[in-house]
Amino acid sequence: MSVFGKIMSAIFGHAGASPASAQPTPSATQPATPGQQTPSAAQSAPPGPTPASTAPLSSVDVDAVLTRLNAQKKKQKLDWRHSIVDLMKLLDLDSSLAARKELAKELHYTGDTKDSAGMNIWLHKQVMIKLAESGGRVPDELKKAG
């Protein structure tokens, strides 16, 4: 799984929703009885776009999830609102420079990865933007470089 995928999974998972989960079709959850044909997807699907293809997969309050996780941390309060390192630590993910460089590559960072401060600021902003694009509710101030 990608580094961003792990971030998204950790946040959406703590909210009790999975961003990648799809609604099972009735034929997928009900076994066919002997002699009964299971309808194909084309036969059982209503005409037009499906709700799953037109609506966000989930709507998770990213701020609330991360604030709650941070409150549960007894030993160390993390500045996840401004720091990609603290955000990754909060989610119990590898926050090493190598992991952040991998995340930068995934998110198509074009700056100098040797400038870790600049890269970290960019990464935090991009992660918040990508979470919002994936169905998370992210306050506007968290999507700005800080």
Image (cartoon, grey):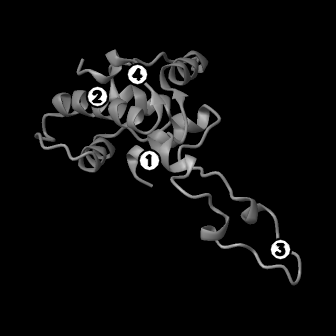
What element does badge 4 sit on? loop
User: What residue is drawn where x is 11% and y is 40%?
Assistant: 111
Q: Are marks 3 and 4 in contact (CB under 8 Å)?
A: no
Q: CA distance from mark 2 to mark 4?
A: 11 Å
Residue matched to label 2 = 125
Residue 106 locus on image (x, y percent): 29, 50
Q: CA distance from mark 2 to mark 3?
A: 48 Å
Q: CA distance from mark 1 to mark 3?
A: 35 Å
Closer to the camera: disc 2 or disc 4? 2
Residue 62 shows which numbered tag?
Answer: none
Q: Earlier in the sequence, mark 4 or mark 1?
A: 1
Residue 80 shows which numbered tag?
Answer: 4
Pick the residue in front: 58 or 78.
58
Is disc 1 surrounded by few (<14), some (14 to 19) or many (20+) residues within 10 Å? Answer: some
Q: Earlier in the sequence, mark 2 or mark 4?
A: 4
Pick the residue in front: 126 or 68.
126
Residue 32 shows which numbered tag?
Answer: 3
Q: Is residue 140 above or below residue 45?
A: above
